[in-house]
Image (cartoon, rainbow, N blue to C red):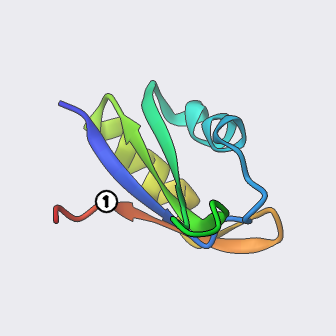
Amino acid sequence: MSTKLHIGNIPRTSTVADIEGVFCKFGHIDSVEITKDPQTGLSTGCGVVEMSNDTDAQSAINRLNFTQYGGRTIGVSRARAI
C-alpha cells in the first residue's frame, strides 16, 4: 500500500524531477505532484510525493522534515485525507 507525503515550503522553481531526485534516495516513488495556483499556473510551494512502501516513506519524513532544500526549510509529513 502506498503512502502519500505532503511537502511544504519548496522553492517555487522546483520541478517534479528535482523532487524525485530528493526522495528517490529513500525508496521507490509512485508519483510526484507539485501544486499549482489555478489562476496563474505557478507553483504554490507545496506538493505531494506518493511512495510505494510505508517504511521508506517514514524514513523520508524522518530524514527530510525541517531540512534545507533550495535555501528553504521544508516540511515533510504524511498527507492528511480530505
The quadrant where residue 19 appears: top right
Q: Which residue is mark 1?
A: 78
- Eyeballing the image, is 21 above or below 12? above
Frontmost residue, 78 versus 42: 42
* Left or right of 33 in this view: 70: right
Q: Is residue 58 left or right of residue 66?
A: left
Q: Secondary structure at mark 1?
A: strand
- Looking at this view, name the residue that lies furthest to the right: 71
Q: Is residue 48 above or below residue 17?
A: below
Q: Is 42 on the left or on the right of 71, as rendered?
A: left
Measuring from the top left, give residue 61's x and y in whole percent: 44, 56
Residue 38 x, y percent position in the rendering: 51, 65
Q: Residue furthest front?
A: 39
The residue depicted at 37 percent of the width and 43 percent of the height is 57
Q: Amino acid at mark 1?
A: Arg
Say which quarter of the image contains residue 73.
bottom right
- Which one is nearer the viewer's eye here, 3 or 65? 3
Say few, some or many: other residues with alpha carbon within 10 Å of mark 1 (under 14 / 14 to 19 / 20 or more): some
Q: How many marks?
A: 1
State the residue in front, 38 or 62. Answer: 38
Looking at the rendered image, the quarter that the C terminus falls into is bottom left
Residue 11 drawn at (x, y percent): 74, 65
Give the quarter of the image for residue 51: top left
Can you give x and y, in whole percent of width and height, for residue 62 in the image? 46, 58
The residue at the point 38 percent across, 53 percent down is: 5
Q: Quadrant of the N terminus?
A: top left
- What residue is shown at x 63% (from left), y 60% (from top)? 41
